[in-house]
Image (cartoon, rainbow, N blue to C red):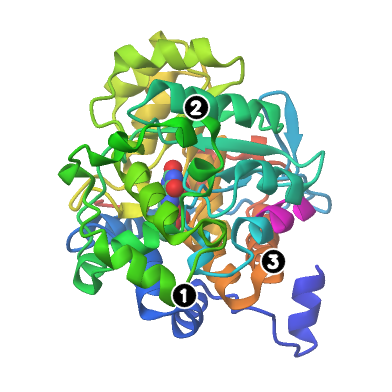
Amino acid sequence: ASIYLAGMAGRRPRVPVDPDRLEQAALRKMSARAGAYVAGGAGAERTMAANRAAFDRWRLVPRMLRDVSTRDLSVELFGRRLPAPLLVAPIGVLEMAHREADLAAARAAASLGLPLIASSQASRPMEAIAEAGGRNAPRWFQLYWSVRDDLAESFVQRAEKAGYEAIVLTLDTTLLGWRPRDLDLGYLPFLRARGIANYISDPVFRALPAEAATAERPAAGLGALGSVLELLRAWPTAPLQALRSGEALEAVRKFIAVYSRPNLTWDDIPRLRQMTRLPILLKGVLHEGDARRAMDLGVDGLIVSNHGGRQVDGGVAALDALPEVVAAVDGRAPVLFDSGVRTGADVLKALCLGARAVLVGRPYVYGLALDGEAGVRAVLENLLAEMDLTLGLIGCRSVAELGVDTLSPLPNR
Ligand code: FNR
């Protein structure tokens, strides 16, 4: 209500409320390289466009004359009641948007009681992010499974110790997508170096022999290392600054050699189960067959996602994949959703199609770029406010009332 009243009183918000203007304002503020990295997608960006277009093919159907004077957005997830079905997506290298990076995002999420999913490739160590959020803040950890099992296990153990409540294993990024905006600017090694805080703070990573870095990993798509040092000198990343330049180069080399595991298969999932008692979610599932396989393996949750259209160009829109995954899971585990969520109405559509909760990605990075912690908070508050208003306006008092009754496909879709 306060956001609405401020607007009626003619006061301008801290960050633009309209998602397109938010993006434009942030891109004006960010460097060309950082902006392109956040805003860009794979190939001709057709999947990214499809993610948005998919929302336009569904219409909310308002129902009238129901008492909507009190509304409740809360949902339960893994034994915890959340104030709203909204999570802050794992995003690596946030330092490119703001020097407080993940710490600012963690504080903003915690102030609203929303879970932050900290990225493996965060710009700050997971322990520092946990501390920034505070003791009772809900937080999950996103894992990129290293080619070294001992490193993956070390990450999971650190996450448990730091109070993370779930492990999100991202499946869709075993190889980095083909991203023309980034390739044309030639700065991937530089950017990636801003996301290695969890690695250089890890005892297993530090103990890896230097030879680990010499392994050829052309598939990782990280390009020339020479430029890393040059760029680090121009714009040093905080955790790397603590290292001497020779060490920094070796750390970046080792990271490139070990951060991903392109040969990961379904057979590896039980090993993750053995590493942790925390709930395990798989992020990046888009096919009903994969959803069933995950259920057979006892996975605790799925996140339907195409990484915001950053991996496969011409891939299926995430929202279009949601109903079949929900049907395949058949209530056995919560199905979460991301990719293309920009408005409160978008969130409600995904919930109508069976998502238990949604993650928001790029918009909060834009808030971060514009105004740090306050900017992230403003973006999240705007989403929550629109969700709450729209829920009431379509005649629902709680998210449990959302479903096929409140959504209709466009004719001739
Ligand atoms: C991401 N995403 C991502 N996912 C993940 O599991 N680990 C990561 O480190 C990152 N890093 C990352 C960086 C940037 C700049 C972006 C834009 C995205 C994907 C992210 O979690 C989420 O799936 C998408 O951002 C959702 O799409 P929207 O909301 O950006 O359209």
Residue to which mark 2 is pinned = 281
> CB of residue at label 2: within 8 Å of ligand 1?
no
Q: Residue at x 31, y 12 (%)?
A: 267
Q: CA distance from mark 3 to mark 2?
A: 27 Å
Residue 313, image x, y percentages: 19, 53
**Screen quadrant of the N terminus:** bottom right
Residue to which mark 3 is pinned = 373
Disc nearest the viewer among 1 and 3 = 3
Under mark 3, the amino acid is: Glu
Under mark 2, the amino acid is: Leu
Report the disc number at residue 135: none
The answer to which of 388 and 49 lies nearer the viewer is 49
Under mark 1, the amino acid is: Glu
Residue to which mark 1 is pinned = 23
Tell me which segment is drawn in magenta.
Answer: 106-112
Q: Secondary structure at mark 2?
A: strand
Q: Residue at x 50, y 10 (%)?
A: 274
165 up-or-down from 54: above or below: above
